[in-house]
Amino acid sequence: MQLIDYRLTDHISMLVRGKNYQSIWLDESDPSVVKVIDQQKLPFVFETKELRSVDDIYTAIKDMTVRGAPLIGAAAAFGIYLATLEITPASNPMQHLANAARYLISCRPTAVNLSIAVNRVMAELNEVKDEKELSSVALRAALQFCEAEKENCRLIGVNGLPLIKEINRKKKGETVNILTHCNAGWLACIDYGTVTSPLYLAHESGIPVHIWVDETRPLNQGARLTAWELGEAGIPYTLVTDNTGGHLMQHGMVDIVITGCDRATKKGDVANKTGTYLKALAAHDNHIPFYAALPLSSFDMTISDGIQEIPIEERDPEEVTHLSGLSGNDIVTIRICPENTTAVNYAFDVTPARLISGLITEKGICKPDEKEIKKMFNNIK
Ligand code: MRU
């Protein structure tokens, strides 16, 4: 295999106990191993995990060892690279890769980043004439995808920062209170995050911010992951139950809501973690701006109507009937309802464009409107 530099760029912004981390990288001593932070165990245990096969990647995405739309795209892109390493003399290489692509895309249905990332790497592989080059081409394409997503997230920060600055100016320098749902931080995005990117920039530039962190049942990505990230970065936050946002908004305690996105339609409807829609309704009722922060890789330009057309992942009801947390030194799972309770677990919901003030992307902020969104895509160099 042709040797290429498999390190992601030197600039890594996120510190964990004084050490720089991204949420996914290649093992420097063995570039056939993909390493990730185990997000199932955070914040109780900080552990990295080695993924060595397409099956490992599939399972890590499915069980949410890795999660968040941009990160599952990146993981799946690396999955195709690992698939090239699994080609045997007996297999038809392109058939093998096409099967791996289908398998990885089937992993989680809502975030479109997954298929966009896989298809981007596959498009490069389809151009390869010499089978010996499949691995190096796949690796380069996966790394390029990651680098691009990192840069996109950085730019989402640059583009989102003026919103926070303006609120701070209007409040005459007082703290800006921002409510977010789920985790759209660097853990979900390789680096910087989408929602957190402008928050980190605001904090770094001395604008006082305070974040209301929705716990985000059933898997508590807010309580476990956003709280942990913000704490590591020294950004003031307060954890609230998912149902508290309406009260906060009615009492002037929220200046802006910013959430992530798993799939946006060409008309600007946005699917994100279940409960996002209720926050948008409350924000609308209270005249509070509601923004979604997303890279262009979260747009599905083939669909218009999010409610009808975005596939909503239905996960194991046990995630609803049970809760995991720390007891002593052990992560334990407990049941929180009568035995044999019927539960249903829709993991995402759709916020219609009419409730959204704007979409913060790497190309700028646009209205959730077909013409404006298309302009963002036309801006791609
Ligand atoms: O089920 P998850 O944890 O993968 O859901 C994540 C979210 O809903 C995030 O808000 C979304 O992926 C955006 S991440 C930048």
Image (cartoon, grey):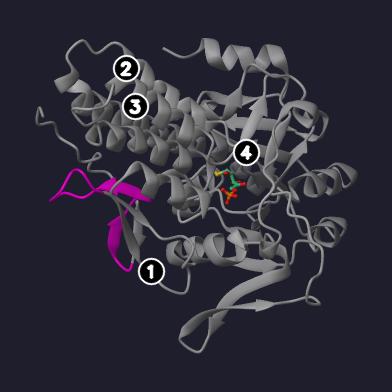
- Is residue 289 rendered to the left or right of residue 228? right
Label 3 crowd bin: few (<14), some (14–19), many (20+), radius 10 Å? some
Instruction: Judge whether residue 27 is colored magenta.
Output: yes
Label 1 crowd bin: few (<14), some (14–19), many (20+), radius 10 Å? few
Label 4 crowd bin: few (<14), some (14–19), many (20+), radius 10 Å? many
Counting from the top left corner in percent of width and height, residue 77 is at: 37, 33
Per the image, the residue denoted by label 1 is 46
Q: Which residues are magenta?
A: 17-33
Q: How many marks?
A: 4
Per the image, the residue denoted by label 4 is 261
Instruction: Judge whether residue 240 is colored magenta.
Output: no
Q: Is residue 115 above or below residue 49?
A: above
Judged from this view, the residue extending furthest toward the bottom is: 328
The answer for how far apart the CA atoms under marks 4 and 1 are is 26 Å
**Marker disc for residue 243:** none
Residue 43 seen in render:
yes
The answer for how far apart the CA atoms under marks 1 and 2 are is 35 Å
Q: Residue at x 37, y 49 (%)?
A: 56
Per the image, the residue denoted by label 2 is 124
Per the image, the residue denoted by label 3 is 96
Q: Residue at x 46, y 56 (%)?
A: 65
